[in-house]
Amino acid sequence: MEDMKLIVAPSPHIRDTDRTEKIMFSVLIALLPVLVASIYLFRWDAVRLVLLSAGAAVATEAIFQRLRNKPITIGDGSALVTGVLLGLIVPPSLPSWMIIIGSAFAVAIGKQVFGGLGHNPFNPALVGRAFLTASFAVAMTNWTAPFDAISAATPLALGAARSNIPNLFFGTVAGSLGETSAVAILIGGIYLFYKGALDYRIPVGILGTVVAMSLLTGQDPVFHLLAGSVLFGAVFMATDPVTSPITVGGRWIFGIGIGLIIMLIRIWGSYPDGVTFAILLMNAATPLLNRWTRPRIYGQGVKASE
Amino acid sequence: MMNLFVILLSALLVNNFVLVRFLGICPFMGVSKQVDSAIGMGLATTFVMVVASAATWLIQWFLLEPFGLPFLQNMAFILVIASMVQLVEMFLHKTSPGLYRAMGIFLPLITTNCAILGLAIMAVQGNYSFIETVVFALGGGLGFTLALILLAGIREDLEFADIPKPLQGAGIAFIIAGLLSLAFSGFAGLV
């Protein structure tokens, strides 16, 4: 008995190698097909906006933490992911200085003022986009056709009857840089799911609700799935682990709520697309969902039988 | 029926009293530290809104208008609201002393919640019928409650967050409120 070492340690007893860096790196790899598609479709505008956005995000994080005399954590890749995401959800014609301001706002006000990664209540990239939409409404809705930078209307503005589904699937339509190509987003999403970095409940909740609402209101469900930001938002934005609920029930409610608000805004609202607002609104409800869907502890909360 | 639904949705989301019209900011900031007291505050305010707007509607159309006294509107309305708040205060003091203490000074201050007076006056300006006024008040009150518990949930989660010193407390609450307001702007044009 004397030579046996019995170690008493608190839980967790099973550990794996997942770290923030690793998950952020998976997200960046999952974004590669989207990035390639956006560069193929929108050429130099995609390169310019994504690089500027990513650079501004990382620089803002470093400057903010330097000013607060805190350890600089740009190495964890979360600011880089925020920057790349924001770069992919803006129109290709957005001026360079606007994307820099938006990206700096996303990281500074969307994340760092709350104490950095893990405390931000809202998805930082979407905070940046909502801020840009509110501040520069014209520039944020100035859509151009892929391949040649001439003005064009987005599928959501044209409507289902005048849109070609295969074009929507491959992304050869006007829209935000990374959001037009459904096939690239799906490849990225499948990779994330395979890596375990994506919980299927949230995207399934969103997409299922969008399909159900389209059928209920007599619209084309395939069009509503492929047009606008629904797929990109469902795969890359709503699944952000910081700003989505941690409970199973909470995740279903979160996804379904996003789907409902998207369709509410698309059908009756004045904005053509409501994905950004829908996800931000459900981000705001996340603390409450976590609180009210807490699983019952085994053996508690049941009346003892005589 | 559709008309009533539109009024309810408008007061609840599209023209949310706190996040879109920016009325009632003081209790919004003051009682949003904990979800439980936020729910209590929201329901108390909703109750006062519904009862007070019903009373002010009667006063406006059966007293002030027929006797040519619309200039007394503000004074009469504030009097009604104050007495309603007194009623709620006495009720809570007796039935739920914990909640009564948690709300503290903000309970009597419901009297000066501009959202309630604003709601009563807007209902008169909008020429709402009696039923429409009550539905409008219900939507406004529930919208106030919604905004309050959303903010309270986020603030509770931030209890252990490393927020920069100058922004702790009210500072970060105003930033969250601003971002919430940005999110609510998506409802524009719904009704």
Image (spheres, grey):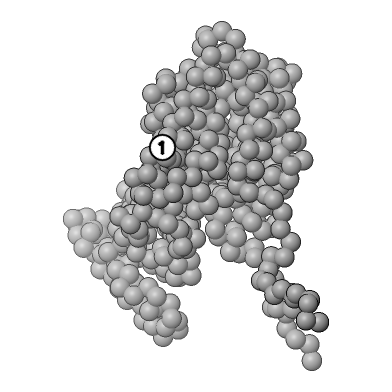
Position of A32 with respect to B16 (left or right) is right
| Relative image position of residue A29 (x, y in whole percent) | 66, 32
Q: In this rendered view, identify the residue nearer to me: A55 or A34.
A: A55
Give the percent coordinates (x, y) of residue B169: 35, 60
Q: Residue, x 75% and y 76% (percent of image)?
A: A6
Task: Tell me if residue A133 comes above or below residue B140 in the rendering.
Answer: above
Q: Viewed as shown, does residue A94 lie left or right of B107?
A: right
Name the subunit of mark 1: A
Q: Is residue A195 visible?
A: yes
Element assignment for label 1: helix
> Is A112 situated left or right of A25 in this image?
left
- Residue B179 location, quadrant: top left
Please say if B105 is above or below B154: below
- Graded by Cα atoms within 10 Å as few (under 14), some (14 to 19) or many (20 or more), the crowding at tag 1 reads many
Which residue is pictured at 25% across the width and 68% down the height?
B79
Q: Which residue is mark 1?
A: A60
Identify residue type, mark 1: Thr
Q: Say whether residue A278 is visible.
A: no
**Of residues A272 and A237, the one drawn nearer to the viewer in this rendering:** A237
Point out residue B124 in the picture as x, y percentages from the top left corner: 33, 52
